Image: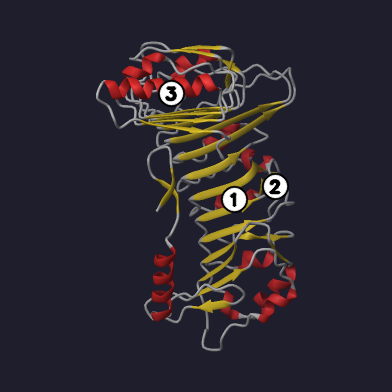
């Protein structure tokens, strides 16, 4: 059962009916594939599948040396996937003593998947860099500031590091030698050693498809030149010096980039402006803009992006009391979200969003109403309003009634009293 959909209509989260879950668990037991249970581990013995060691723990338990009590059966000579899961992140703490066995036992040496994303580590375990067959690595380390050399993990394709919000993590210089890397995601701020970007030998990660949250202390253009085939990019730029002038990075060379998230944070009003459309990726489909405080007139540039289908504006990236949308632009936009803006008056014509299917307004407390011209946008399928003014909610209902009168009974209007969880 679908619980929440993505802005492009895909499934983001879903629920499984308890009867279906019971069926899946029983089937897994019958085939001796996987038996997830609270408090102990199970190992796959099916000849048709790779062995899996799977630990599943109740929330609130702290694991120390006692984790070694979960012994590996004698018949298991090696396994390829090692996953720890809890009901909630941070509920289980893994201490360094867990890795003592890893140095002694060959059974860990062929690991291809290591998922510790739900278990908090005190620091980066150096035993991991010896697992040369790893293709997938997920870690949760809140206090880490700098990663050790990782190039020995030459097979690694996906690296996920969850850290404290806003924590800057410096990647090692040898990251540029990890040529198989496809996905690099750090929840804090991702930075590089300055020497790695100024080296005379330029290394390029041709296989890298997604990276977040990029926050280089040096030139962002030097970083972009080394990831030419990225399709999903999240940037987080922070400035505190009011004498600085930030320019939006030139992304025109990233011809495969389809999804861009740009987060601009400043302590003081640092000058910033939206560049001309030619500075954006030519095939950009999804754009999320956060922070910045640019005048709404800058939205005219965004409206000129020819392939844009999904647009999210958050935390006053554009600010000011009035947004007047032109008659042209946003020709292929299907999804529009405005979240936590100080916008009061929105003026638009029926030709402003000819393909719009979904409109989401979250925490727009000052916005008086949705433009009445939306009554003539017959591609609309849903309007969602979260924690906003009564007049805004009433305008959404009026649009629904008007479209029903014109024969469109498919438009849904959902009014939520609370903020949307993002």
Q: Which mark is residue 396?
A: 3
Q: Which element type, helix, strand or loop, lies under badge 3?
A: helix
Report x, y in % for residue 5.
Answer: 42, 43
Tell whether 212 sits left or right of 170: left
Q: Which element type, helix, strand or loop, lies under badge 2?
A: loop
User: Between residues 98 and 360, which one lies in front from this camera angle?
Assistant: 360
Mark nearest the camera among 1 and 3 is 3
Mark nearest the camera among 2 and 3 is 3
Mark nearest the camera among 2 and 1 is 2
Q: Which mark is residue 175?
A: 1
Report x, y in % for residue 51.
Answer: 47, 76
- Where is 230 relative to 333, above or below? below
Query: Label 2 to label 3, Cα distance in Å?
Result: 38 Å
Write the residue at 45% across / 18% down. Answer: 370
Tell whether 421 sits left or right of 231: right
Q: Which element type, helix, strand or loop, lies under badge 1?
A: helix
- Quadrant including the C terminus: top right
Q: Earlier in the sequence, mark 1 or mark 3?
A: 1
Residue tagged 2: 164
Query: Residue 264 sits in which quadrant?
Result: top right
Query: Residue 358 sits in which quadrant?
Result: top left
Mark 1 near mark 3, Cβ–Cβ under 8 Å?
Answer: no
User: Between residues 359 and 368, which one lies in front from this camera angle?
Assistant: 368
Callout 1 crowding tier (Cα within 10 Å): few <14, some 14–19, many ≥20: many
Query: Residue 148 sits in which quadrant?
Result: bottom right
Report x, y in % for residue 278.
Answer: 43, 21
- Where is 285 relative to 174, above or below? above
Mark 2 near mark 3, Cβ–Cβ under 8 Å?
Answer: no
Callout 3 crowding tier (Cα within 10 Å): few <14, some 14–19, many ≥20: many
Query: Label 1 to label 3, Cα distance in Å?
Result: 50 Å
């Amino acid at each position: 059962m679908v619980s929440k959909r993505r802005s492009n209509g895909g499934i983001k989260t879903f629920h499984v009916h308890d009867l279906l879950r019971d069926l899946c668990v029983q089937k897994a037991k019958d085939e001796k594939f996987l038996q997830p249970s609270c408090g102990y581990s199970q190992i796959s013995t099916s000849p048709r599948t790779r062995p899996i060691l799977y630990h599943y723990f109740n929330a609130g338990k702290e694991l120390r040396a006692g984790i070694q009590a979960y012994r590996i059966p004698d018949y298991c000579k090696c396994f390829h996937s090692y996953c720890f899961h809890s009901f909630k992140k941070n509920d289980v703490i893994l201490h360094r003593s867990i890795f003592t066995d890893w140095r002694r036992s060959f059974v860990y040496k062929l690991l291809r998947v290591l998922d510790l994303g739900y278990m908090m580590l005190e620091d980066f375990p150096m035993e991991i860099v010896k697992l040369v067959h790893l293709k997938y690595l997920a870690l949760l380390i809140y206090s880490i500031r700098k990663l050790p050399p990782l190039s020995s993990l030459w097979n690694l394709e996906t690296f996920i590091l969850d850290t404290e919000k806003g924590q800057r993590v410096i990647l090692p210089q040898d990251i540029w030698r990890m040529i198989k890397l496809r996905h690099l995601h750090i929840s804090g701020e991702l930075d590089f050693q300055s020497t790695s970007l100024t080296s005379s030998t330029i290394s390029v990660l041709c296989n890298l498809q997604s990276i977040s949250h990029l926050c280089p202390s040096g030139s962002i253009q030097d970083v972009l030149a080394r990831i030419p085939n990225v399709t999903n990019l999240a940037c987080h730029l922070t400035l505190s010096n009011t004498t600085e002038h930030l320019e939006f990075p030139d992304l025109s060379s990233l011809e495969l980039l389809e999804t861009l998230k740009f987060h601009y944070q400043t302590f003081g009003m640092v000058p910033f402006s939206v560049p001309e459309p030619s500075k954006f990726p030519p095939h950009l489909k999804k754009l999320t803009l956060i922070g910045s405080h640019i005048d709404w007139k800058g939205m005219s540039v965004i409206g000129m992006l020819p392939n844009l289908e999904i647009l999210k504006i958050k935390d006053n990236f554009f600010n000011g009391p009035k947004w007047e949308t032109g008659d042209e632009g946003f020709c292929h936009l299907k999804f529009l979200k405005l979240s936590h803006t100080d916008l009061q008056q929105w003026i638009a014509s029926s030709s402003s969003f000819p393909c719009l299917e979904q409109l989401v307004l979250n925490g727009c407390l000052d916005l008086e109403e949705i433009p009445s011209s939306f009554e003539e946008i017959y591609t609309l399928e849903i309007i969602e309003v979260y924690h906003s003014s009564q007049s805004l909610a009433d305008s959404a209902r009026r649009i629904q009634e008007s479209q029903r009168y014109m024969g469109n009974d498919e438009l849904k209007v959902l009014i939520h009293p609370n903020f949307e969880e993002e």
